[in-house]
């Protein structure tokens, strides 16, 4: 599978203290870590207003001030009130602007960046950030399943773990990470698997990269390579649809959607199958726009050459559809839209999906990828 197993990499925010009486000049890596927290709203920032229900009202500073034990970590915190919206209302433009702002903070010397937002769209926004994050420093997304007005609100614990991850050298070169319930996930593989459970975020095909335990980041495995895309054209408004196949489909519905799209992701049955009546419509669409074939099943890949009946994965790929591989339909839509927004050449789209879906070699990725710095396959420890 797509992750590499290595001995645990353990990272603490601070290096070992020298023996008492020893004078040591600090190096840049020994300076107090600085983490920038961008607040976007979401359940983690929601309280009861004048109307019914909760809505995002708390600032990023409010969230940070509510975290017990944060002051004792020695991590310098800067807060940025970036947006104050529910996760369901975030846009591609919001996340692209966030990626630019995060890059600016990291270039200015921040150790890492944390993003707080609504969990409704974390599996999508985190993957978009992963594609747009070119630097080695950690970019960590977190949120909450229980708002601050409820008993057992999980926001403060999630934010603390995310900040500790962003401050740790062990989390370098991993792209965008998602941290909730003390688990650390790679953005490309994480999924929200339950509508209310606090442990909703899981990586069904790979498992988590690691955990935050006793204030330390323990990575049990690492992302073997990173995939990034040049900054998208913000003036370009690309329409990419996601169509989920179901029993006894009417092809006119698919055609009506496809005719209004610049790109389409089809979430098929099982390993990438559709009802036979949809085949001609998909064939015609694939001649006009990129059509990506994913699986609506929560885990597992699309196949490429096992089944041969009309509407099977082999039949559809022969008709020009692009296999998503291990990439979930939601992520496939993020990738396809980002590729189109970045004005990717038509001949580059299939190779990009081959690599992102773990069907091809990383060398097939159409753009240069961030170079992994250092040998992090050996266990290391930095003690506070």
Image (cartoon, rainbow, N blue to C red):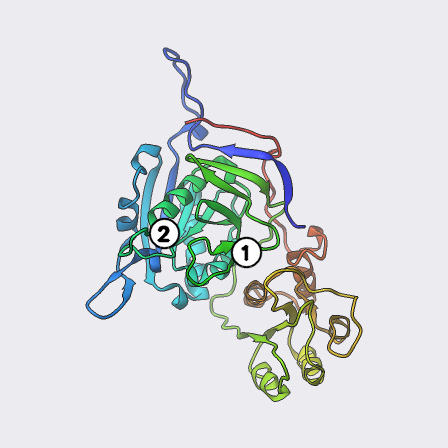
For numbered disc 2, what is the local secondary structure? strand
Q: Is residue 319 above or below residue 77?
A: below
Where residue 371 is drawn, which disc sits there?
A: none
Residue reaching furthest left? 50
Question: Which comes before the other along the chain, label 2 or label 1?
Answer: 2
State the count of labels: 2
Q: Secondary structure at mark 1?
A: helix
Residue 84 left/right relative to 112: left
Q: Residue furthest top?
A: 21
Q: Quadrant of residue 294?
A: bottom right
Quarter occupied by residue 107: top left
Eyeballing the image, is 216 above or below 185?
Answer: above
Q: From the top left corner, tell me how far across and down residue 288 is, in percent.
A: 66, 79
Residue 18, compared with residue 294, is above or below; it is above
Q: Quadrant of the C terminus?
A: top left
Dot 2, how many residues are within 10 Å of its Cα: few (below 14), some (14-19), or many (20+)? many
The answer to whether residue 160 is left or right of residue 239 is left
* Residues at marks 2 and 1 touching, judged by CB atoms closer than 8 Å: no
The residue under the point 41% across, 14% down is: 19
- In space, the residues marked 2 and 1 are separated at their CA atoms by 18 Å
Residue bearing mark 1: 131
Q: Percent from the top left, x then y, of residue 364?
A: 71, 55
């Amino acid at each position: 599978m797509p992750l590499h197993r290595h001995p645990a990499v353990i990272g603490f925010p601070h290096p070992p203290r020298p023996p008492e009486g020893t004078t040591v000049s600090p190096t840049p890596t020994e300076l107090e870590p600085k983490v920038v927290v961008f607040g976007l709203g979401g359940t983690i920032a929601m309280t009861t207003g004048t109307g019914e229900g909760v809505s995002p009202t708390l600032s990023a500073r409010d969230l940070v001030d509510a975290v017990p034990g944060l002051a004792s970590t020695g991590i310098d915190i800067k807060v940025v009130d970036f947006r104050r919206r529910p996760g369901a209302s975030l846009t591609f433009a919001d996340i692209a602007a966030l990626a630019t702002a995060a890059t600016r903070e990291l270039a200015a010397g921040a150790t890492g960046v944390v993003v707080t937002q609504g969990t409704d769209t974390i599996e999508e926004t985190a993957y978009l950030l992963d594609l747009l994050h070119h630097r080695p420093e950690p970019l960590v997304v977190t949120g909450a399943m229980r708002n601050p007005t409820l008993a057992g609100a999980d926001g403060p614990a999630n934010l603390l773990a995310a900040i500790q991850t962003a401050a740790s050298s062990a989390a370098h070169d991993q792209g965008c990470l998602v941290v909730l319930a003390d688990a650390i996930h790679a953005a490309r593989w994480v999924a929200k698997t339950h509508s209310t459970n606090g442990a909703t975020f899981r990586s069904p095909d790979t498992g988590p990269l690691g955990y935050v335990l006793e204030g330390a980041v323990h990575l049990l495995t690492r992302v073997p390579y990173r995939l990034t895309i040049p900054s998208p054209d913000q003036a370009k408004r690309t329409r990419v649809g996601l169509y989920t196949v179901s029993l006894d489909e009417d092809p006119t519905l698919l055609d009506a959607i496809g005719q209004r799209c610049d790109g389409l992701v089809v979430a098929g049955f099982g390993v990438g199958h559709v009802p036979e009546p949809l085949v001609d419509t998909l064939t015609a669409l694939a001649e006009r726009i990129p059509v990506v074939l994913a699986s609506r099943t929560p885990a597992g890949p699309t196949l490429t050459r096992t089944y041969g009946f009309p509407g099977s994965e082999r039949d559809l790929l022969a008709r020009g559809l692009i296999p998503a591989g291990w990439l979930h339909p939601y992520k496939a839509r993020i990738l396809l839209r980002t590729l189109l927004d970045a004005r990717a050449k038509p001949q580059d789209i299939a190779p990009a999906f081959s690599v992102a879906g773990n069907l091809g070699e990383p060398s097939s990725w159409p753009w240069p990828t961030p170079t992994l710095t250092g040998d992090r396959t050996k266990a290391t420890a930095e003690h506070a």
